[in-house]
Amino acid sequence: MPQDLADEPATELLARVTTSHKSHYQIADEPFAIFPTWKWYALGNLVSVIGGVSYDKCDVTKNGIRILRGGNIQNGALLLESDDVFLPTKYKDGENSIKKGDILIVGSTGSETLIGKAGFALKDFEDTQIGAFLRIIRPRSADFIEYLHLIFKSDYYSNYIRGKAKGTTINNIKIKDLTEFAVPIPPLNEQRRIVKTASEILTITSNLQKQLTM
């Protein structure tokens, strides 16, 4: 895709986002070459990483705070299930309540294929939080939510996570591995063009699949 050199460089966009936060994470190396107007950033400088709630099984109830687990993430969507766990309101935590724009990932699992699986919150989920095996990736700016969603749908992200998460009996994603994940950030206008093009390609692919199954 041709680059517009008149676009505001990614460094200026990210300067507005990161100056209000004290975190300054570094990446070990730049995985591949990017355009001059783009910039590599450690994920921890762009998002907050939020852990889930641990609870006593004896506290599980029939209503209250809904707790999402790995099975609630299906094909990128967050689904509410009939067997979801509920906890008393004493477990309510505004930080790990699910908000529009959040990315939920499976942070701990015995399955190599499910580790890092991502789901995307397209709305606020009232009285809904995440369990201890999930993580919330919360973008610090609405400007690049859609672009980050694309990153978390990519093989680039999946391959990175699977390479980092291998364990002896259970796969775990360390917070450090998330905060140091290298993300290529283009200028804001370029992000919008990428998101638009990806959406158009997805629509074409979906239509072709429907035609093949008719």
Image: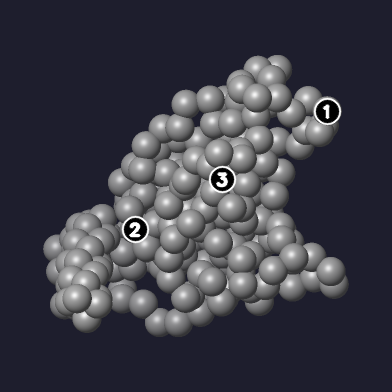
- The residue tagged 3 is 136
Q: Amino acid at mark 3?
A: Ile
- The residue tagged 2 is 147
Residue lying at 67% horizontally and 41% vertically, measured from the top left: 131
Neighbours of disc 2 within 10 Å: few (<14), some (14-19), many (20+): many
Most extreme residue toward the front, as rendered? 214
Q: Amino acid at mark 1?
A: Cys
Q: Amino acid at mark 2?
A: Tyr
| Residue 198 vertical position relative to residue 68 in the rendered view, above or below | below
Q: CA distance from mark 1 to mark 2?
A: 41 Å
Neighbours of disc 3 within 10 Å: few (<14), some (14-19), many (20+): many
Residue lying at 43% horizontally and 57% vertically, measured from the top left: 76
Residue 69 rendering spot, x and y as whole percentages: 62, 46
Kindly indicate the quadrant of the structure image that contains residue 191. bottom left
Q: CA distance from mark 3 to mark 2?
A: 16 Å
| Residue 90 vertical position relative to residue 142 in the rendered view, above or below | above
The quadrant of the image that shows the N terminus is bottom left
Q: Nearer the viewer, residue 71 or 36?
A: 71
Q: N-terminal of the two: label 1 or label 3?
A: 1
- Judged by depth in the image, the label closer to the viewer, 1 or 2, is 1
Q: N-terminal of the two: label 1 or label 2?
A: 1
Element marked by disc 1: helix
Element marked by disc 3: strand
Most extreme residue toward the top, as rendered? 90
- The residue tagged 1 is 58
| Residue 111 vertical position relative to residue 12 in the rendered view, above or below | below
